Image (spheres, rainbow, N blue to C red):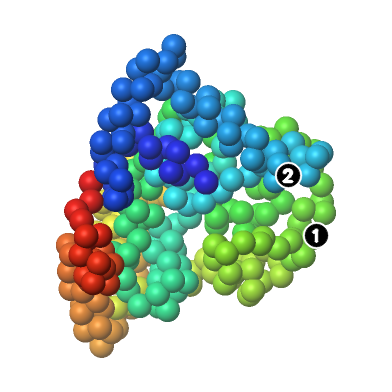
Amino acid sequence: MLLPFLYALRPDDVYAEYGHRVAVSAVAEFLDRLPDGVEDYRMAVRDLATQLYTKASYPSARYFIDKTPRYALVAEELLAVFPNAPVIVLWRNPLSVVTSIADSWTEGRWMPYLHKADLFTSIERLTAAAPVAGSRMLTLRYEDLVLRPEEELRRVVDHLGLAWDPAVLANFGSTRATGVVGDRRGVQAYATVSADSLDRWKASVSSPVRKRWCRRYLNWIGHERLAMMGYDLLALQAQLDAVPSRPLLAAPDAALALKGMLHNALEPDIIKRKLRLLPHWHRVQSHS
């Protein structure tokens, strides 16, 4: 819900028929007229969000969790809008992340170019925000959470100032998140916390093309950022190198990589939309 409000202050990365850059410029000029400038806008966004979160919550609720991986794109802005809110970041082995994305959203096909916001930009912005958050940011690793769920969840409740309730784990299987978005695979596959997925990535990267891509990806993240996330670059590289290669899988992955280059350069979804609008020529326009 907060993404459009926070992107209203960003001149780039948004395509809209109303002219986004002009709108951002006008908003910035308006905010300059306010007593506290952009801080007044942040306070208004905080008030709006708090009112809606309150309406969506039980009367006795102490916290409302608003969670999406794409909030990493506006991590520093969220910290500024909610200066007193505790923050929880769940990291995961980046090799598991990229293969999980492939299994969950592209039926196992190697198309990471569709998820650059999650794989690249989010890591840049979330690791940059971590020093700003300081002690109010609790970081967890997925691997630790599934291997030692009670220990890690106790860290969460301590961070939130709540009392530990063993029913959190006992009733895990009966908890269901509703809504139209989200990953349903794990919810459907497991009734309890499970570590079955920890090494699943190894079966998905046996193609030489995938191994090469993953090696370059780890090098891009780099030693410093991986250490902030709780991982060691050399250890991940060694695990990747130990996965046997299956050269016969390289051809389809290479074809998809070429398709990915064209997809990112041409943005076919925008082109297809414009083609559908051709009978209404006056609606075909450039976006800014």
Under circle 2, the secondary element is loop
Identify the residue shown where x is 40% and y is 75%.
Answer: 106
The amino acid beneath tag 1 is Ala
Residue 279 x, y percent position in the rendering: 23, 72
Task: Give the number of the disc on residue 57.
Answer: 2
Pointer 2 local density, CA inside 10 Å: few below 14, some 14–19, many at least 20? few
- Compared to residue 268, the image places residue 207 above or below, namely below
Task: Give the number of the disc on residue 263.
Answer: none
Pointer 1 local density, CA inside 10 Å: few below 14, some 14–19, many at least 20? few
Residue 263 visible (yes or no): no
Say whether disc 2 or disc 1 marks the residue closer to the N-terminus.
2
Identify the residue shown where x is 65% and y is 47%.
Answer: 152
* 98 left or right of 91 in image: left
Identity of the residue furthest to the top in this view: 35
Instruction: Out of 79 and 88, give the one closest to the viewer.
Output: 79
Q: Residue beneath label 1, please?
A: 170
Instruction: Out of 154 and 119, give the one closest to the viewer.
Output: 119
Residue 248 x, y percent position in the rendering: 25, 88
- Which quadrant of the structure image shows residue 4? top left
Name the mark nearer the viewer: 2 or 1. 2
Distance in Å between CA atoms under marks 2 and 1: 23 Å
The amino acid beneath tag 2 is Ser
